[in-house]
Image (cartoon, rainbow, N blue to C red):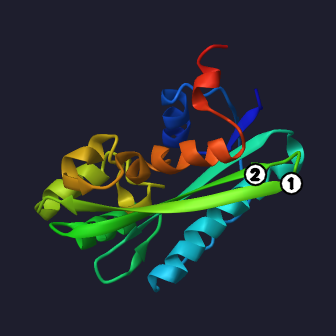
């Protein structure tokens, strides 16, 4: 079996790989994420795929095996891109923009084979609709601290799930590591997830 590495500081991405039964080591990427505040779909796709690749490449020289990485962006209905809030006020502002509306989430997955020095990257779009929440409820959520460092200011797999009325597309993509992309990409490198279930 090929050695697998996850280039991510995200606990949710690590949990998703564990959920698939994969055995892997976590590496901390050093690449700075490219930020985009608005753009066309093509620009947003390029940004999220480049970010995923940059994270994997930042640790490429340290290990032999397959390096998996991902990136996620939240896009409002007028194509503004919401990154990861660093303060409660930033998180509140983002959630207010999403409140009571549909928004899109794009997640990219990149895999680098450090031995053959080849790579593959892909992305998937999903749509999420928020309930219409009063501001004081949003502030209560923000006060939990869960918003910080999460794309769009919420964690659908955590307390932030109560904000969500409906999801169209991939739930795991909204969390940050879409199985719909990850499993086929691993197959491109002759890795089947069930190989790791038997070891």
* Drawn side of residue 34 relative to residue 30, left or right: left
Residue drawn 84% across the image and 47% down it: 114
* Drawn side of residue 86 relative to residue 196, left or right: left
Residue drawn 54% across the image and 28% down it: 18
Quote the CA–CA distance across marks 1 and 2: 7 Å
Q: Do tag 1 and tag 2 residues touch (Cβ < 8 Å)? A: yes
Q: Residue 102 in the image: x percent, y percent? A: 22, 68
- Label 1: few (<14), some (14–19) or many (≥20) C-alpha neighbours in 10 Å: few
Q: On the image, numbered disc 2 is attached to which residue?
A: 112
Q: Is residue 189 visible?
A: yes
Kindly indicate the quadrant of the structure image that contains residue 152. bottom left
- Label 2: few (<14), some (14–19) or many (≥20) C-alpha neighbours in 10 Å: many
User: Which mark is on residue 117?
Assistant: 1
- The answer to whether 103 is drawn above or below residue 70 in the figure is below
Say which quadrant the C terminus sits in. Answer: top right
* Drawn side of residue 66 relative to residue 160, left or right: right
Assign a secondary structure to mark 2. strand
Q: Residue 174 in the image: x percent, y percent? A: 39, 53
Kindly indicate the quadrant of the structure image that contains residue 66. top right
Kindly indicate the quadrant of the structure image that contains residue 157. top left
Residue drawn 57% across the image and 46% down it: 184
Q: Is 107 in front, or is 145?
A: 107
Q: Residue 115 in the image: x percent, y percent? A: 88, 45
Q: Is 155 in front, or is 137?
A: 155
Q: Is residue 86 visible?
A: no
């Amino acid at each position: 079996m090929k050695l697998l590495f996850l280039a991510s500081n995200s606990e949710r991405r690590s949990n998703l790989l564990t959920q698939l039964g994969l055995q892997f080591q976590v590496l901390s990427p050093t690449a700075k994420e490219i930020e985009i505040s608005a753009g066309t779909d093509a620009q947003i796709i390029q940004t999220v795929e480049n970010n995923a690749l940059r994270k994997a490449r930042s640790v490429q020289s340290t290990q032999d095996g397959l390096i998996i990485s991902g990136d996620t962006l939240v896009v409002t209905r007028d194509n503004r891109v919401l990154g990861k809030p660093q303060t409660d006020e930033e998180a509140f502002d983002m959630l207010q923009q999403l409140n009571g509306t549909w928004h899109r989430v794009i997640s990219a997955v990149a895999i680098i084979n450090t031995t053959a020095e080849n790579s593959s990257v892909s992305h998937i779009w999903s749509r999420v609709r928020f309930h219409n929440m009063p501001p004081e409820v949003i502030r209560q959520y923000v006060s939990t601290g869960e918003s910080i460092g999460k794309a769009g200011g919420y964690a659908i797999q955590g307390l932030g799930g109560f904000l969500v009325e409906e999801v169209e597309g991939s739930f795991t993509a909204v969390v940050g590591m879409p199985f719909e992309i990850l499993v086929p990409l691993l197959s491109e490198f002759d890795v089947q997830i069930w190989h790791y279930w038997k070891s």
